[in-house]
Amino acid sequence: MHVTVPTSAGRVRGQWKRRVAAFMDVSYAAPPFGPRRLRPPEPPQPWTGVRDAFVPGPTAPQPGYLPAMAGLLEEAVAPGEDCLNLNVWTPAPGRTGGRLPVMVWIHGGAFRNGSGSLPSYDGTQLAADGVVCVTLNYRLGAEGFLLLPDGTSNLGLLDQVAALEWVRDNIAEFGGDPENVTVFGQSAGAISITALMTMPQARGLFRRAITQSGAGHHSHPEHIARRVTERLAALAGAEPTRESLAAVPPRRLIAADAALGREIAQEAAAPGQWGESAGGGTTVLPVVDGATLPQRPIDALAGGAGRDIDLLTGTTSDEFRLFLVPLGIGTRITDQVLQGFLAGLGLDPAEARRVYARPEAAPGDLLSAAMSDHAYRIPALRVAEARAAHGAKTFVYEFAWPSPALGGALGACHMAEIGFVFGTLDNPLAGPDAPGELSDHIRAAWTSFARTGRPTGTGIPGGGLPHWPAYAGRRSVMRLDGAGAPLVLEDPAADERRLWHGLR
């Protein structure tokens, strides 16, 4: 059964999937190639008639994940030029008076991989829970985040703004309320959202935000962004200009970006050279260019930016195990290597080892715990604390359910919560025995937050969450682990938090 809805560029035909209508591959901007390559997004070309919106559209060009991640991470398929598209799931298409809350997903992938159409991001269940769910693509890697000599930068973030403008202008036709939009995302998506909270172009486009495993520290100042552009261009055999880079085939730019990542990984001990990309986990990042992104997001939030936006933020318990375990790195960490890493992070190695000590923990386990804090938990808490100073409402969670993948060695790793948010528990990190009740709790909390600004999680079988207080005051954190009822903790892992005081 099909259903047709008008948009600002033309009519689209979706199809019903149980109680939800799905519209796939809806263009929110023109293809960013040819004369538009490495330029800000432009509106899509209008069409006549009705366009079928039955299957996902092209994804942004990207390299794919390392072979060691095969079977753990979902790969985007079918890259193509017409990649600035989005998907909509709604229980009420065409009901312009429905005014359902809208949830817009921004995917992760280290700013080099990912797509809004991955199976784990299927919005059917969230829409069945009473929201309009939107997922989107944006430009990745060099195409999306280089700083060009004329000042062009953050094209991937501007793509996200263009998608949110499309939501503002069109979502009422899908039954959504354009004045009640929540952006939610994970990893690079969460970092993007934190940046959007401080961007002038994004102001007024969303009311609430949910950031999963990503916060406001990861960005490049201009001098490092310029260094990234110059080195990547050299590796691609081009000049660091728009004209020269736009003439390079996408696959060659992707190869150059991968080569740069390997170079950065070899220079992990020199963070001043590559800033927040030291270690090679990322190459490009949002650029603090003074225009599209006026300040480093955490600094802008500390100054009061985004205080009118409600925020739900959090991390998983064992974030970094996703990067250490599959690659076999954890077992190769010796006491000496651990000592060097801890010192390189600015910690006193002896004190850090004492604080992170666990029974039977190997050096690799201690490194994982420290890096999980450094890259994810501490930045999230600093966002919550920065906002508390301005009375901005912020709720914090910890996702602690251990993934069964790789024999349970991953723990509650990076990305382990995504299937629970979408109700897509057949993904590689969850699996058939994942507790459905935990997904019910999380979806209820996320949709309640989108609806009201509070993650109450009521109205689900077996009762809802306990009262979820805001972070400010007692540093309250909701622990979600599936082992029993969700539990509110006050200042959990306080010694570890204090260990990072005063460090960037």
Image (cartoon, rainbow, N blue to C red):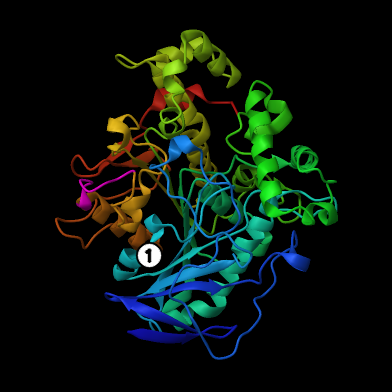
Q: Which quarter of the rendered picture does the N terminus lie within?
A: bottom left
Compared to 481, does 36 lie above or below?
A: below
| Magenta segment main secondary structure | loop
Number of residue marks: 1
User: In percent of the image, x 78 and y 56: which residue is there?
Assistant: 246
Residue position marked by numbered label 1 in the rendering? 123
Residue pictured at 46% horizontal, 24% vertical: 370
Quarter holding the C terminus is: top right
Write the residue at 37% across / 79% down. 15
Q: Which residues are magenta?
A: 429-436
432 or 179: nearer the viewer:
432
- Image coordinates of residue 176 in percent, x first then y, are 43, 76
Residue sitting at x 26%, y 46%:
431
**Residue 500 lies in magenta, yes or no?**
no
Please identify the residue farthest to the left as the structure is shown: 462
Corner quadrant of residue 282: top right
Indicate the position of residue 225 as horizontal and vertical percent values: 74, 42
Question: Which residue is more in the foreground, 311 or 134?
Answer: 134
The magenta stretch spans residue 432: yes
> Is residue 502 at all visible to an observer of this figure?
yes
The crowd level at tag 1 (other Cα within 10 Å; few <14, some 14-19, many 20+) is many
Whether residue 94 is visible here, answered yes or no, is: no
> Mark 1 falls on what kind of element?
loop
- Locate residue 3: give its quadrant: bottom left
The amino acid type, in three-letter code, at marker 1 is Gly
> Looking at the image, which is closer to me, 333 or 131?
333
| 84 lies above or below 415 | below
Residue 486 or residue 87, whichever sits in front: 87
| In this picture, residue 281 sits left or right of residue 430 | right
Whether residue 245 sits left or right of residue 320 in the image: it is right
x, y percent for residue 269: 65, 20
Q: Residue furthest bottom?
A: 49
